[in-house]
Structure formats: C-alpha cells, structure tokens
Image: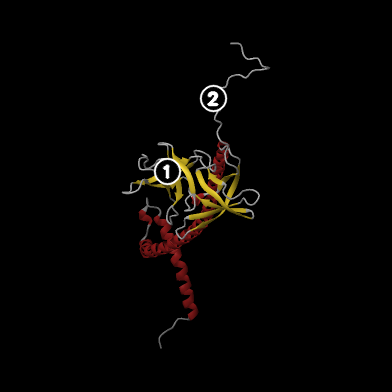
Amino acid sequence: MPFQPPRRALHWVLALAILAAPAALVTASWRSYGVDQPAKLSAFDRIVLRVASPVQAAVTWVIDGIAGVWHDYVWLVDVKDENDELRQENERLRRALGDATRLAKESAELEALVDLRGRTAAESLPARVVASSTNPQFRVTRIVIDRGAGEVAPGMPVLASEGVVGRVQSVVGSYADVLLAVDTQSSIDVIVPRTGSRGILKGLGSDNSYACRIEYLQKGEAVKEEDVIVTSGLGGVFPREVPVGRIRKVSQADYGLYQQVEVAPAVDFSRLRSVIVLLAPPPPPDPSARQKKSPEQAFGVGPYR
C-alpha cells in the first residue's frame, strides 16, 4: 500500500506554498525595481518574475477593465441626469420664448391698432377675435368678435392694422359675426391710387386661397399686377384710402367691356387676433378746409385797405 501523507500535513504544505508564492513575487518585484543593480536578481527571482508576469498582466487587464466599465457606467449615469436636466431647461426656455414671441406680436398688433384708431376720423371700438369658422382646406370663412348687442350693429365696417377685414353681419348676445371681404356676399367700393381706376371689390369665396375680384373695371384702365387697392370712401361705409389688397392677376377677355382682375387681400385672416369696429361713418371732408379765409368784420368795421 503506497504511502499517503497525513491530510493535515498536506494542508500545511499548501498553506505555506500559498503564502510563499506572494512573498517570493513581492520580493522579486521589489528587487526588480533596482534596474541600476540587475545583478542582485537571483535565478529564482528571474523565474518567479517570468512566471508571474503573464498572471500580473492578466489580473491588471481585468481590474482595469472592471474599473473602466464602472467609471463609464457612473459617467453615463451622470450624463443621463445632466441630459434630463438640460432637456427640461430647454423645454422651459422654449415655452418662455414662445410666450415672449406671442406677447411681442400681440403688443405690436395693439400698437398698430392704436395707430389706426388715431388715423381714423370715425369713432371706433376695439375688439378681439374669439372664434373663427374654417372650410375643409383650413381657410377662415367667418370670424366672431367679443362685441355684441348694445355695442355694435350689422353693417359696421371692421378693420385690422393691415387693412379691411369686412363688415359686421349679425349680432347675437355678447358676440358679433363678421362677414369677411373675401366672402361672395361682400361688396366694397375701391380705387387704384396709381391710375385712379374705380371698381367694386367682390369676394371670390375660394376654397384654397383668399382672393377677391374687381368688377366693372374697364379694359382701358391700365392697371397691372402688384398695384395697391384701397377703399374709395364712397357709400359712407368705409373711410377713404384704407388698404384692401394688391392686384394678383390681370387678364383681358375676348369679349365684354371689363377686365378680369384678381386681388390678394391685405389682411391674413388666419392670423387675426385684434380688430376695430367703426361705430359711425367718417365725417365728410370740409370743402372749405383748404380755402384761404379773409378776416371777418368786427362790429361792422373791416380792416383798413
């Protein structure tokens, strides 16, 4: 029967080997630092270093990899938190910018309306657009303003800072329905300032565009595209020289006495927020305003001549 060492002695031998291996590795490594005295390394030290070097490299690679993964994970967690904060801040700034842009636009519109009221001789009332009706092509066909019975009446003209909007069509309670200038029921007496040509502006009621036409404009009138169209002031409804739009297209028919003139309105009805309603027609111009008046007699005595 072969000799078997006691199990306890085997354990002690293994324990001593486990303890001796790191000690030998540490000693050999410490001696290897003395690169200026390589002769101090014994053959045993060289064997230990040669055997341990691959193991050390592998262990170092594993530890560095784990440390790198941990560092990247922690860094990514921090980056995610920062990205969330930046995203929230970006959203807050975007909302603030939108509010500031909206307020600036509303302020500019109100200033333009105040200027329009100052330039309009007729008494007027400001109003806000509170609702609108659109067709399937998302074109505004009607607007509703926050002025009602006791404030406005059907037929009163409605203006925006850009020009003519239309007329009050009906009043229900605290609100009024406005007939737009591009509606087929609308009719406005207009003039082309460049040529002095007159006509009647009628809405086309197009589904996919805002457009009007000028009726009764004779072929001899030399109007052209981009000519400005304004109100004539005739009829006692709209004041004179309020912008209506620009000529978009002019065509000559082979028959008839009149041209076919299409007009693009001056007002963008889809963006209307504020308007003014003229409560009374503007006063007629004073025919003697530009005439030089002579001094009147005082107590029956005139100036010495």
Q: Position of residue 155 (x, y in %)?
A: 56, 48
Q: Position of residue 232 (x, y in %)?
A: 48, 40
| Sooner in the amino-acid sequence: mark 2 or mark 1 | 1
Q: Nearer the viewer, residue 20 or 264?
A: 264
Between the C-alphas of marks 2 and 1, the distance is 35 Å
Residue 68 visible within the image: yes
Residue 82 visible within the image: no
Please identify the residue farthest to the front as the structure is shown.
Answer: 300
User: Looking at the picture, which amino acid does disc 2 mark?
Assistant: Gln
Does 31 appear above or below 217? below
Residue 88 lies in what quarter of the image?
A: bottom right
Q: Is 289 on the left or on the right of 19, as rendered?
A: right
Secondary structure state at the residue bearing disc 1: strand
Please identify the residue farthest to the left as the structure is shown.
Answer: 254
Q: Which label is found at residue 246?
A: 1
Q: Which label is found at residue 291?
A: 2
Q: Quadrant of the N terminus?
A: bottom left
User: Dot 1: within a 10 Å radius of its alpha carbon, few (fewer than 14), some, or many (20 or more) residues?
Assistant: many
Does 240 appear above or below 81? above
User: Looking at the picture, which amino acid does disc 1 mark?
Assistant: Arg
